[in-house]
Image (cartoon, rainbow, N blue to C red):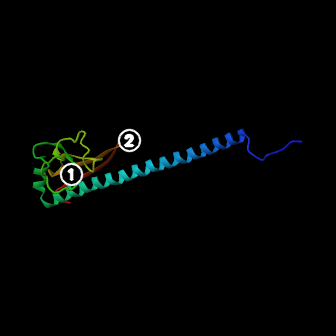
Amino acid sequence: MKIYRGGFTLLEVVIFMSLFTTIFLTITYVNLGSIKNNKLNEHKIMASYYAETLGEWLRGEKDASWSAFLINSDLDDNNSIDYCFNESTLSTWTAGANFFQGQCSNNFALNNIFQREAGFNKIIGGGGETQIEADISVRWYEGPELQQIKLNTILNQYE
């Protein structure tokens, strides 16, 4: 007569553990992907905010005084120029450690993540009016990949 003890065989335990591990790893992988996408979206929102903030500040500077805006943007003699705007608070055109004329290169000083740069191009319209094209870009690294948000706006004396 055979006595049955009611336990699991080694094969049943191995099959259960492999199924459990596969399900657990799948759930973990999906959660990590969601967290990565959430962080990317958070950085996109912040970058859009920084780009829009600079665009609005430039409009305010232009509205305050068009001639001062042309002088400050240094476009009187030049047709195009780049500025690095890595200061979180924009108040004046005064040069500093994180605000200067020229490209930002590897200066990601804005919130220790972002790099905000604006390129200005002088455009002379058909009627002789001067317009300034401002190409604003905010860049950051998301892992090994460089991400970027761009904003383009045309500024003219009469809007």
Horizontal and vertical percent position of residue 2? 86, 42
In the drawing, does residue 16 fall left or right of residue 70? right
Q: Amino acid at mark 1?
A: Glu
Q: Residue at x 32, y 51 (%)?
A: 47
Horizontal and vertical percent position of residue 53? 25, 56
In this rendered view, identify the residue nearer to me: 108 or 27: 27
In this rendered view, identify the residue nearer to me: 144 or 146: 144
Q: Residue at x 82, y 45 (%)?
A: 4
What is the total number of numbered labels drawn onto the structure image?
A: 2
Which dot marks residue 143?
2
Q: Secondary structure at mark 2?
A: loop
Q: Residue at x 13, y 52 (%)?
A: 93
Horizontal and vertical percent position of residue 146? 34, 41
- The N terminus: image quadrant: top right
In the drawing, does residue 6 fall left or right of residue 66? right
Q: Which residue is mark 1?
A: 87
Q: Quadrant of residue 45?
A: bottom left
Which dot marks residue 126?
none
